[in-house]
Amino acid sequence: MNQTIEGLADTLKILSDKTRLTILSLLKEKEMCVCDIVDILQTTQPNISQHLKKLKSGGLVLETKRRQWVYYSLNVDDKAYLSGIIQKLPSMKEQLLQLNHECCK
Amino acid sequence: MNQTIEGLADTLKILSDKTRLTILSLLKEKEMCVCDIVDILQTTQPNISQHLKKLKSGGLVLETKRRQWVYYSLNVDDKAYLSGIIQKLPSMKEQLLQLNHECCK
DNA sequence: CGATTATATAATCATTTACTTATACAATGA
DNA sequence: TCATTGTATAAGTAAATGATTATATAATCG
């Protein structure tokens, strides 16, 4: 995802989806495992996995495995041109309160 | 195009296209009429008109008619969160040199 | 080991998208 | 007024996209 105008379009395409923006909003608060994201977004696990795959392919999130869980975290510090958008994402603190999984204790 | 997360996704969807980003790059230099944009982007006039319609619907460009021409101009000064992206758009100064229409003299 | 849990991938489908061609509309100018 | 020029809209189509269901893979734990 280099920065030709096409690369920029590709990055923006990844960002231009409600579910993916919501995932980024969540990850702004803290790294999260797939199961927690599924829980909060009220959709299926494969759906979230596929969105995460796109975010990862665009370099917008990082993935790390610990025990049986895969954690995703925001990776935008090196993309200053996106900071305006990232800041615009609403807080998801409220939604995080409802989580009660072992993975994220 | 209010700023819920869905509105943000809609705006980003409008931005996430190579042709539309290129149009915005052009308009960064100066306002332009449709025929000039068609000339530079080497595509059909209806194609450009449809892209301009989307940009306009998203509030990203303004339209003004003068004589037989319709001029479009960038309208992003009130959208600070997009400034990083707008700045990222490459200069199109080179391409503007080749224009030689009456409308833009 | 086998069962369970967490996640990824594959296949399918409906919807959306960008483009093309054809046509309509609008303004100008002979 | 009629032809021309500039732009918009409509209709059709192929490709891309997001979601679902089913299945595969991987790690943990009894």
Image: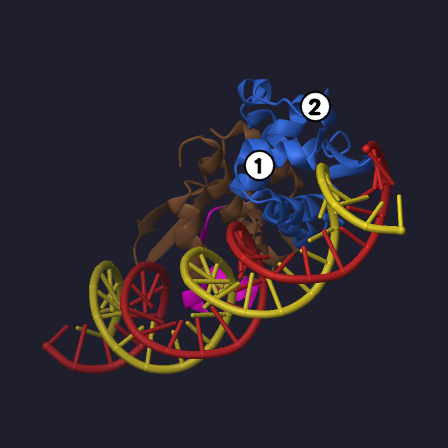
Chain colours: A brown, B blue, C red, D yellow
Establish if D19 lies above or below B33.
below
Closest to the observer, B59 or D5: D5
Contact? badges 1 and 2 (CB < 8 Å): no
Q: Secondary structure at mark 1?
A: helix
Q: Secondary structure at mark 2?
A: loop
Residue at 66% across, 35% down:
B35
Closest to the observer, B42 or B92: B42
Image mark for residue B87? none
Nearer the viewer's eye, disc 1 or disc 2? 2
Establish if D19 lies above or below D1.
below
Part of the protein shown in magenta:
A31-47
Task: Indicate the quadrant where residue B97 lies.
Answer: top right
* Residue B4 is a magenta residue: no
Distance between the Cα atoms at labels 1 and 2? 15 Å
Identify residue type, mark 1.
Leu
Residue at 82% across, 36% down:
B64
| Chain designation of label 2 | B
Secondary structure, magenta segment, majority class: helix
Establish if A36 lies above or below B25.
below
Image mark for residue B21? 1
Q: How would you rate the neighbour count of disc 1 (Cα within 10 Å): few for under 14, some for 14-19, many for 20 or more?
A: many
For the residues tagged 1 and 2, is the chain the same?
yes
**D19 sits left or right of A87 in the view:** left
Residue underneath mark 2: B30
Residue B19 location in percent, x, y? 55, 40
